[in-house]
Amino acid sequence: MVKVFFNNSCNICRAEINHYKKYSEGNVEWVDVTDNQEAQKITSKSYKELLRRMHVIQDGKLIQGAEVFLIIWKNIPKYNFLYKIFRFKPLFFLFLKNKHLLK
């Protein structure tokens, strides 16, 4: 199972994760890092590092930053199509560079 570490004290993060939770069908374990020393121990990351960006543990490997979205999308059936599109690095980096234009 994929374990996602996220900052529930951030309004934007909380809203996005709550949306994904609705569709994850139990495929993802969601871990709030807010004041969570166990999360710090599991990830070997400082509290500040955990608050700044999302992290995932998949197959025993810690992954952080934008690649986390690929893993989330891959594990949520409704968003699997995004994974299939953006798993190709050039498209994913293009998406990251221009995602502000989608708002």
Image (spheres, rainbow, N blue to C red):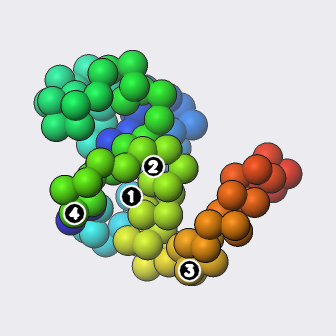
Report helix, strand or loop for mark 2. Answer: helix
Q: Upstream in the sequence, badge 1 or badge 3?
A: 1
- The vertical placement of 46 against 15, above or below, is above
| Residue under numbered circle 2 | 17
Note whether 73 is above or below 80 in the view shown: above
Instruction: Give the total of numbered labels.
Output: 4
Q: Mark 1 or mark 4, which is nearer the start of the sequence?
A: 1
Give how far apart the Cα atoms at labels 1 and 2 are.
Answer: 6 Å
User: In the rendered structure, which amino acid carries the disc numbered 3?
Assistant: Lys
* Residue marked by disc 4: 59
How far, Cα to Cα, is label 2 from label 3?
Answer: 20 Å
The residue indicated by pointer 1 is: 21
Cβ–Cβ below 8 Å for labels 1 and 3?
no
Residue at left offset 30%, top offset 36%: 32
Identified by mark 4, the residue type is Asp
Where is residue 74 drawn, in percent x and y? 43, 72
Mark sitting on residue 11 = none
Looking at the image, do the residues carrying marks 1 and 2 touch, with CB atoms under 8 Å apart?
yes
Regarding mark 1 in the picture, which secondary structure is present there?
Answer: helix
